[in-house]
Amino acid sequence: VLRLCPEVSNASRLAALIDFTFNLGAGNLQASTLRRRVNAGEWAAVPAELMGWNKAGGRVLAGLTRRRAAEA
């Protein structure tokens, strides 16, 4: 996570990104708009980016929605 988002120094933000990466993989973080927002310091846009990752098999899952809300 620190290699992909080197400027994140806030512990809670870093923890959320680590959780995201643990669950979805570094490749998804690397290719995501979420990473671009984080690296640009656009923190107000990060919660909405996280909330977009709540689908599996093309369906919105309540558990993923709760997890992304906690990360946001």
Image: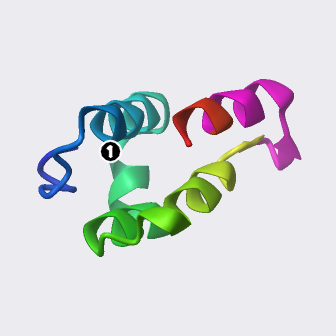
Q: Is residue 45 left or right of residue 9?
A: right
Range of residues picked out in magenta: 56-68
Q: Which residue is mark 1?
A: 26
Residue 25 occupies quadrant: top left
Is 38 in front, or is 23? 38
Is 4 in front, or is 46? 46
Residue occupying the point 42% across, 63% down: 43
**Relative height, residue 64 to residue 44 (above, below):** above
**Relative height, residue 50 to residue 70 (above, below):** below
**Residue 6 belongs to the span the image colors magenta:** no
**Residue 62 belongs to the span the image colors magenta:** yes
Q: Residue furthest top?
A: 63
Residue 11 occupies quadrant: top left
- Residue 29 % position (x, y): 38, 53
Residue occupying the point 68% across, 56% down: 52
Residue 22 occupies quadrant: top left
Q: Is residue 60 left or right of residue 53?
A: right
Residue occupying the point 51% across, 65% down: 44
**Relative height, residue 29 to residue 16 (above, below):** below
- Residue 32 % position (x, y): 45, 64
Helix, strand or loop status at disc 1: helix
What amino acid type should be assigned to the residue bearing mark 1?
Answer: Ala
